[in-house]
Image: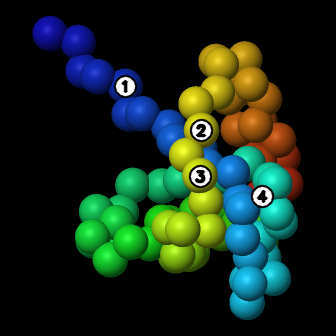
Amino acid sequence: MKQRKKEIRFVICIQNEGCEDLELGKIYQVLPDESAANEDYLRVIDESGEDYLYPGNYFIPIALPQAAERAVLALSKSKAPA
């Protein structure tokens, strides 16, 4: 049986009050974090290239076509700190 590929999730930022590492209208990748989700937070890779917890209501989930998903992931990897 094939192992199911881990689903990559994306969100769009709609609020950034008190969070200078988030840009309004920008697409961010969400990392799985069940305990954070239970507290209504999301673990997001922000502008620093690191993952942090942010309030879930700062984002709206979105579905991207595969080509757009690959492009967003490639761009985020090219900006990641060494």
- Kind of residue at badge 4: Ala
Tell me the CA gap for discs 3 and 2: 6 Å
Q: Quadrant of residue 50?
A: bottom right
| Residue type at the position of mark 2 | Ile
Q: Which residue is mark 1?
A: 5
Q: Is residue 62 above or below residue 20?
A: above
Q: Which residue was labeled with disc 4?
A: 80
| Amino acid type of the residue that numbered disc 3 sits on in the rendered structure | Ile
Q: Answer yes or no: do the residues labelled 3 and 2 have beta carbons within 8 Å? A: yes
Image color mode: rainbow
Is 80 situated left or right of 41 in this image? Answer: right
Position in image of residue 30 (x %, y %): 53, 53
Q: Is residue 20 visible?
A: yes
**Total numbered circles:** 4
Of marks 2 and 1, the one in the foreground: 2
Tell me which numbered mark, 3 or 4, is placed earlier along the sequence.
Answer: 3
Rendered residue at 34%/66% (across/down): 37
| Residue designated by label 2 | 62
Relative placement, left or right, of 5 versus 23 is: left
- Residue carrying label 3: 60
